[in-house]
Image (cartoon, rainbow, N blue to C red):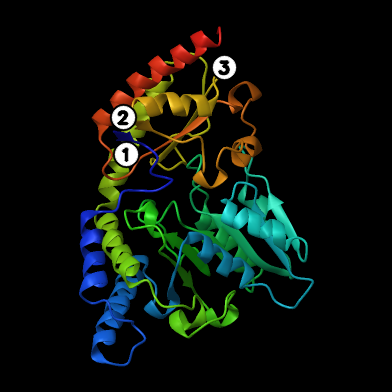
Amino acid sequence: MIYLDNAATTKVSDKAVKEMVNAMTVDFGNPSSLYDFGMRAEKLVTDSRDTIAKLLNVKSENLFFTSCGTEGNNIAINGSVTNNEREEFITTNIEHSSVFNTYNRLKEKRKVHFVNVNDEFSVDDIVSLVNENTRLVSVMHVNNETGRILPVNEIGRKIKEKNPNTLFHVDGIQGFGKIKIDINDSKIDFYTISGHKIHAPKGIGAIFIKNPERVKPIITGGSQESGISPGTENVAGIVALKASSEEVFSKIDETYDRLYKMKSKLMDDLSKIDGVYFNSKLEGYSPYITNVCFNHIKSEVLLHYLEQDEIYISTGSACNGSKKSRIIQSINTPDEFSDGCIRISFTDDTLEESVDLFVEKLKLRVEEIRDIMGR
């Protein structure tokens, strides 16, 4: 099997599994229990919080565990809404559905600006919209379909220069542990992560909140996670997130350089196929993600042909299902290619020989489909 859909989810690492098993079978107490057995579980949570906070260079008291990246993004957005009906929000048209759809609902009650991010995009397109009423700006660090890296450092600093009271939210789910970021220098108020993108299990995430007192909980419950994300903590997921975070951060530079070279070779090889168009580039884009399109091809058909070879890629975000990608449409992909776009996404353990075999099979499948279509 060749798995190249790591932007959708990743295999859980052996170290993360080991930590989970211990939390589920040995130190399985409730962290909120007052006796020593529960306190052992609480210590696992505290140690994990401290470790991840240190990796992000933030204070432990500003890091809160969530059930997933979607919850974190919703906390940042919906938790920032106040009773001031004049407040405004800014985001982009290439955000993940957990941000884009949340703002689509919010725009029924508040003014929301959606900034177009294409080849002509400029940071000033966002900053020019900031005014005295701007409550929150939300942008993703790395786009989940094309891998485009947004200049969050510049965006954050310019937002704060224009209005120091405007909150800055960065969806870091595709960047955490992969693309370096300085949360403090970027003036970030909210930063969200998701475990299953970096070899932790599904169902665990975290959010950095610079000023928790400025956020109202979006669900009510107990006092866990300071009420930001109440409910009994997923201790097994938390310790797994700690383990996987340590692993990816320990080799972040090495992995980036290796995958950069791998992506460069992949793009060179794919460019030799007739009728190809890239939505991803090498510079300014994550080496983990490549989005490429073929004319006279339906991406879903190509996906299922490759599936027969036990090769797994995607047509875009897994959250979109079979729907045509909103992001691909918004970045002005030429019509003749827009139906034939696939996403190839690496992880730190992706092997070059697997990518080479993928390219070989892909060429054959593209030719086969085009022959059937009479092209």
Compared to 279, does 268 lie above or below?
A: above
Task: Label 2, secondary structure: give it.
Answer: helix
Q: Nearer the viewer, mark 1 or mark 2?
A: 2
Q: Say which quarter of the image contains residue 44.
A: bottom left
Q: Say which quarter of the image contains residue 243.
A: bottom left
**Which residue position holds label 2?**
355
Is residue 326 in sight in this rendering?
yes
Compared to 247, does 27 lie above or below?
A: below
Q: Earlier in the sequence, mark 1 or mark 2?
A: 1
Q: Nearer the viewer, mark 1 or mark 3?
A: 3
**Marks 1 and 3, how far apart at CA:** 29 Å
Residue type at the position of mark 1: Leu
Q: What crowding class fits label 1: few (fewer than 14 Cα within 10 Å), some (14-19), or many (20 or more)?
A: many
Where is residue 99 shown, x and y percent of the image?
60, 57
Give the residue displayed 49% in from the left and 78% down from the top.
230
Give the residue displayed 24% in from the left and 59% down from the top.
17
Q: Nearer the viewer, mark 3 or mark 2?
A: 3
Residue type at the position of mark 3: His
**Marks 1 and 2, how far apart at CA:** 11 Å
